[in-house]
Image (cartoon, grey):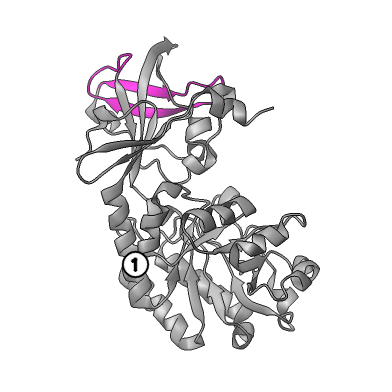
Amino acid sequence: MIDYSKAPSPSYLLDLGRLKRNLSLIKRVQDEAGVSVILALKGFSMWRVFPLVKEYLKGATASSLHEARLIFEEMGVKAHTYSPAYLPTEFEEVLGYSSHVTFNSLSEYERFRHRLSGKGVSAGLRVNPEYSEVEVDLYNPAAKGSRLGVAPDKLADGLPEGVDGLHFHTLCESSSYDLEKVLAAFEHHFGHLFPALKWVNFGGGHLMTRQGYDISHLISLLKGFRQRTGLEVILEPGSAIAWETGELIATVLDVVENRGVKTAILDVSFTAHMPDTLEMPYLPKILGSVPEGEGAYHYRMGGVSCLAGDYKEGYTFTSPLEPGDQIVFWDMIHYTMVKTTTFNGVRHPDICIWKEDGELEVVKAFGYEDFKGRLS
């Protein structure tokens, strides 16, 4: 049991025991299905635990030169790299840190293919199956006119020479049944290319560590595809690795009331520290809050930035909030630290680990120099 009172405020607090449980479950899928599962850094880049991740998974995937380098330096493996576009001045360095490089378009592949010769890097193309269960366009790579991936009609006559694999990604915190539907569309549009391939990357969005996810169905689906095609299968979840592995610790600084609305102003910011809560949007859970009918004290949670919309409302408590009270936001490790900013110069939360023996480790504390170092 975590003793949240020991954590500094504000801070992200990773529970090492919960992370290991997620990794164990994902390794079971990897082993039983005979696939490769790799960590997507765009969802979770806490490199302090990369050596632990490496004990369970088969590597990591990068979306940029910096992520590829981080994988190489801190996990000790070469990255599976995909970017919507590569900078010509960085491409040679990307190749040096990568085992696989996936291109977003046929034109880009043609532009760079001559630079792959002799590098020992496997080339792939991202494709668009033109099907997704994701309802929010901001997170839907298969939305009409998407810039991500090659459309089916452009590969009707076959693959360019030198392409070893295909990569699709149209899921977001999705189920195995969503994957099944996407996979049917993928096979329908691109199955004629399978005999020329070595591997297929099913992308991310496989939230297999969420309670209720049908693990057996996922394993059956993956095994079935492998048996039908003989291809190597790669999955690259991000959220699933860090799902419900840690919290964001905050403190009430003030409580203000205007026109009957009470706002607890915190030492964290939704826009700077929890941007997906505003982008998706969704209401993050606060430990100790209760359903509306079970408490008499209702609050809007306000961030510490000056953005007018830096708040979330809909929280109820059984006792009033006061300055100094601790607020613990549940499940705030994936897609938080990787997307934070120092907007307004607000202090970045510390990064901490709660170890299985009950020890709290402050991995990184942030201050003025971190803010200043991002500017000029």
Foreground: 342 or 159? 342
**Other-residue count near label 1 (Cα within 10 Å), few / some / many at <14 / 14–19 / ≥20:** some
- Give the image quarter of residue 167: bottom right
Find residue 157 and report its horizontal and vertical position in percent.
74, 84
Q: Three-letter amino acid code at disc 1?
A: Lys
Q: Is there any visible trace of residue 308 in the rendered image?
A: no
* 235 vs 117: above or below: above
Q: What stretch is highlighted in magenta?
A: 296-324
Q: Does residue 265 appear left or right of residue 78 in this picture?
A: left
Q: Is there any visible trace of residue 291 in the rendered image?
A: yes
Quarter holding the C terminus is top right
Q: How many labels does the image show?
A: 1
**For numbered disc 1, what is the local secondary structure?**
helix
* 70 vs 231: above or below: above
Residue at 63% x, 86% y is 196
Residue at 53% x, 60% y is 61
Residue picked out by circle 1: 27
Residue at 26% x, 29% y is 6
Q: Does residue 119 appear left or right of residue 172 in this picture?
A: right
Find residue 103 and report its horizontal and vertical position in percent.
68, 66
Foreground: 301 or 80? 80
Q: Does residue 332 appear left or right of residue 72 in this picture?
A: left
Quarter holding the N terminus is top left
Residue at 56% x, 33% y is 341
* 335 vs 153: above or below: above
